Amino acid sequence: MTQQKNNMLSRSFAWFLCISLCFLSFHIKNKKGVALKKIVIDAGHGGKDPGCNGKYSREKDITLQIALELGELIKTNLPDIEVTYTRKDDRFIELHDRAGIANRIDADLFISIHVNAGPEQFAGTETYCMGLHKTESNMQVAQRENSSILMEANNQANYDGFDPNKPESYIMFSLYQSANLSNSMILAERIEEEFKTYNQRYSRGVKQAGFLVLWKTTMPAVLVETGFLTHKEEEIYLNSEKGKTHTAYGIYSAIEDYKLLIEAE
């Protein structure tokens, strides 16, 4: 009985230490005066991975068009920021390589652009930060986006045996707490606010889930679900020039606000 109590105390201390270190990291990473100089824009899916499908369109095509428009907006209006794309055409990029691109250039921000799928009545935008999913719907979105790794030749080695279809695989995310979560949440909230106010879109809010594309990034990172291809009106909107332009501008405007905030003296 005494040994059992000692083990419980040891585990409690370990959790306390972990939480304390996470809190310290949050404090350090959110100091004022940090410059936003490099942004990586990730167009979700691509090549042999189409993502989700609507009645006449594919996720990979829409995400690429929005990503390229977003990059041009940043280059034109914030020329001091260096923009890097994970892909600029229809090619397959492994999830770990997408994060790797951002890490190698020491980016200050990573934005992954996606389109959602679900029951035909589901509509709206939602922006995710890396974390443990808190609802079944968050879990389903993460499983769908993470399933891209099943197309990768060395997925068992690259993701430590992670299986996107097994809920128990996601337990590892309960032990992961990003030191950049606070800044990621700030950006995510501004993106959703822009979608609501500028685009007049229905926002499903800011959420957390275990996305592999965000897992290994070493900077603030968000995954933006720009709407549902499985919803009739939203598929039309996302395929229109207006829809793609407004979506890109909404994300850009949030980045502009975020830049002003973190660079404030």
Image (cartoon, grey):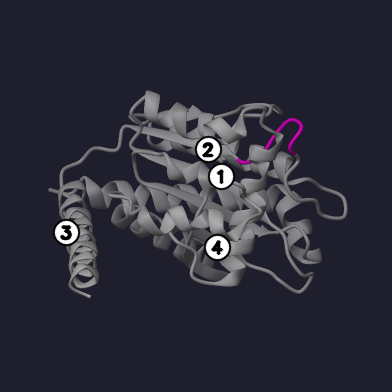
The residue located at (80%, 51%) in the rendering is 53
Of the numbered discs 4 and 1, the one sitting upstream in the chain is 4
Q: Position of residue 246 (x, y in %)?
A: 59, 53
Element marked by disc 4:
strand
Q: Upstream in the sequence, badge 4 or badge 2? A: 4
Q: Which mark is residue 100?
A: none
Identify the residue at horizontal 48%, vertical 70% (top origin): 134
Residue that numbered label 4 is attached to: 126
Local packing at callout 1 (Cα closer than 10 Å; few below 14, some 14-19, many 20+) is some
Q: Residues within 10 Å of mark 3 (few under 14, many from 20)?
A: few
Q: Kindly identify the amino acid type of the residue bearing the numbered disc 1.
A: Phe
Name the image quarter holding residue 94: top right
How far is mark 4 from mark 1, CA to CA?
Answer: 25 Å
Task: Characterize the local packing of mark 2: few (<14), some (14-19) or many (20 or more) Cα atoms within 10 angstroms.
Answer: few
3 or 1: mark nearer the eye: 1
Query: Does the CB distance between marks 2 and 1 fall below 8 Å?
Result: yes
Residue 100, above or below 191: above
Give the side of residue 219 with respect to residue 263, left or right: right
Quadrant in which residue 76 is drawn: top left
Disc 4 and disc 2 in contact, CB within 8 angstroms: no
Task: Say whether disc 4 or disc 3 marks the residue closer to the N-terminus.
Answer: 3
